[in-house]
Image: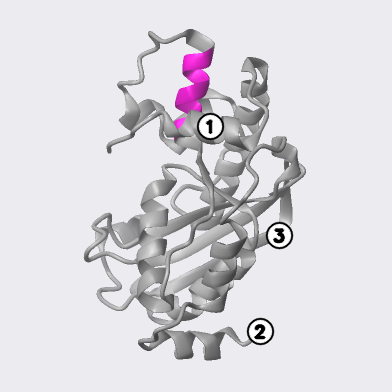
Amino acid sequence: MDFSKIAKLFGRKSTGVHPLIARSQEYFRNFNKDLPLQDYDFVVFDTELSGFDLNKDEIVAIGAVKIRNLQIQCACTFYSLVRPEKDAHTPSTLIHRLTPGKLIAARPLAEVLPEFIDFCGEAVQIGHYTRLDLDFINKATTKLFGGALKTPYLDTMRLAMAYNESKHGHYYDHSNIHGAYTLNALSREFNLPIFTEHNALQDSLQTAYLFLFLVKKMREYGFRTLNDYLKAGRKWKIIL
């Protein structure tokens, strides 16, 4: 599939929806969420952003790794830098070790995003505080390709909160969100492998390990189906 031609075509104003978006929306319209978790494919993903303001900041990198049969597929990864339309030099890009030169040489989001959507295919998405990532992605897909993704997603931050409540009871203190529930803090708390921070692919791998740890632990409290985990994650409203 020639994504560069598709990107140019759908980057212009159009009354239609990008075929990748339409395919995803149709597939997940009546998606069965009641199967055991191991019956689903997952894509764990992360974005790097120029900042956290949805109105002015942009995606500058996307990374992802697949999970199949509840095993990380290290040979199935996605990573791409993204050339921003605005400033390629912000405090956030420096944190991610992304120099202006690297970003200026990268491809635009209109070319990268279709490849990422195609990589995800029919997989359920996973991220850590993933609502922020999805807000940026869906803003871009709506602007460039005529519609938002409707993919079910799991948030490992929310799952960690649900796990701690299941383990410790309803009086467990979730108030220290800023510290205890960061990806790095949870990974260290659970003695998981530690990857390089602030890299979209490395953070995706870190999140994948955290997800599989939480799945294993939450099974002890009766979590079995995808819907069980979706409901557990939706319970917590996180404001950062």
Q: Residue tagged by mark 3? A: 76
Would you say residue 159 sits in the magenta stretch?
Answer: yes
Tell me: 60 left or right of 41: left
Depth-wise, is mark 2 or mark 1 nearer the camera?
Answer: 2
Q: Position of residue 217 (x, y in %)?
A: 64, 22
N-terminal-most mark, 3 or 1? 3
For disc 1, the neighbor class at 10 Å (few under 14, some 14 to 19, many from 20) is some
Residue indicated by mark 1: 187
- Quadrant containing the C terminus is top left
Of callouts 2 and 1, the N-terminal one: 2
Asked if 103 appears above or below 159 in the picture, the reply is below
Q: Is residue 125 above or below residue 186?
A: below
Q: Which residues are magenta?
A: 158-166
Query: What is the secondary structure assignment of the residue under circle 2?
Result: loop
Is residue 162 rendered magenta in the image? yes
Give the Cα distance between marks 2 and 1: 38 Å
Amino acid bearing label 1: Ser
Near-viewer residue (37 or 205): 37
Depth check, mark 3 against mark 1: the one in front is 3
- Residue type, label 2: Met
Q: CA distance from mark 2 to mark 3?
A: 18 Å
Label 2: how many residues lie within 10 Å, few (<14), some (14-19) or many (20+)?
few
Give coordinates of residue 133: x percent, y percent: 41, 54
Q: Secondary structure at mark 3?
A: strand
* Quadrant containing the N terminus in the rendered view: bottom right
Q: Is residue 96 visible?
A: no
Q: Residue at x 50, y 36 (%)?
A: 156
Q: Is residue 172 rendered to the left or right of residue 219? A: left
Q: Position of residue 79 (x, y in %)?
A: 56, 65
Secondary structure mostly taken by the magenta-highlighted segment of the chain: helix
Relative side of 5 to 181, left or right? right
Residue tagged 2: 1
